[in-house]
Amino acid sequence: MPRITGASIAEHVAAQEAAVVAAAQRLFAERGVAAVSLGDIAAEVGLRRTSLYRYFPTKGHILQVWFDREMDPLLARSQEVVDELGPTVEALRAWLDVQLDFVADEAHGALVDASAGASDLSPEILEHFGQRHRELYATLGGILRTGGARTPEEVRVRALLVAGLVRSSADLVAGGVPTAVVREELHRAATAVAGLD
């Protein structure tokens, strides 16, 4: 019987999952997702491969947990900004700043690179990623309705356009354009898309 290292089984499982995700992050960064096997990850953590399957049946499941650990605080902070400032231009700009800081962060870039390198993600995991992004964009709903988006489809389209602006802005920052310049233009363009100009 395996030795439990936490105060409870739940704590043990949480610690093992965290160790597996951390090991996978290191290995994915070093070698790329395709070159890392579940056996490699298990060895890095000191588990047998069959023990690792109890926690994560595929690399995609590891990526999903990593993704959720990144997305949960982002979603919470995004909602806090909107709740604090209401459906205003200031809330939109603060929301944009939260998003830009997140997507321009090196840790998020590592997750994006790892996900892009995982060519065998199941439809369920891809749907999960999509659902979490929809939850994030939904935090903009009240702001976009204030800007004149009347139907759910109009809100969705404007939210996706704003999200595209954020991703493009992160690419510009990564390419060396000063963050302050990008942030100012992001605010201007997203305010127009939201109908708040």
Image (cartoon, rainbow, N blue to C red):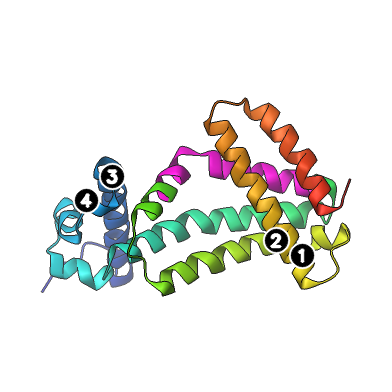
- Which mark is first along the chain, 4 or 2? 4
Q: CA distance from mark 1 to mark 4?
A: 41 Å
- Which mark is first along the chain, 1 or 3? 3
Report the quarter where the N terminus lies: bottom left
Residues at marks 3 and 4 touching, judged by CB atoms closer than 8 Å: no
Residues at marks 2 and 4 touching, judged by CB atoms closer than 8 Å: no
Report the quarter where the C terminus lies: top right
Residue identified by numbered label 4: 35
- Which mark is first along the chain, 4 or 3? 3
Secondary structure mostly taken by the magenta-highlighted segment of the chain: helix
Q: Secondary structure at mark 4?
A: helix
Picture coordinates of residue 7, whole percent (x, y): 28, 65
- Which mark is first along the chain, 4 or 1? 4
Q: Is residue 100 magenta?
A: yes
Q: CA distance from mark 1 to mark 2?
A: 11 Å
Q: Which mark is residue 26?
A: 3
Residue identified by numbered label 1: 155
Q: CA distance from mark 3 to mark 4?
A: 12 Å
**Label 4 CA crowd tier, 10 Å (few <14, some 14–19, many 20+):** few
Q: Which residues are magenta?
A: 91-111
Q: Residue at x 62, y 25 (%)?
A: 178
**Label 1 CA crowd tier, 10 Å (few <14, some 14–19, many 20+):** many
Q: Is residue 133 visible?
A: yes
Q: Residue at x 56, y 38 (%)?
A: 171
Q: CA distance from mark 3 to mark 2?
A: 32 Å
Picture coordinates of residue 168, whole percent (x, y): 61, 42
Q: Nearer the viewer, residue 99 or 166?
A: 166
Residue identified by numbered label 2: 139
Q: Is residue 140 visible?
A: no
Q: Amino acid at mark 1?
A: Val
Picture coordinates of residue 141, whole percent (x, y): 76, 63
Q: Is residue 94 above or below residue 147?
A: above
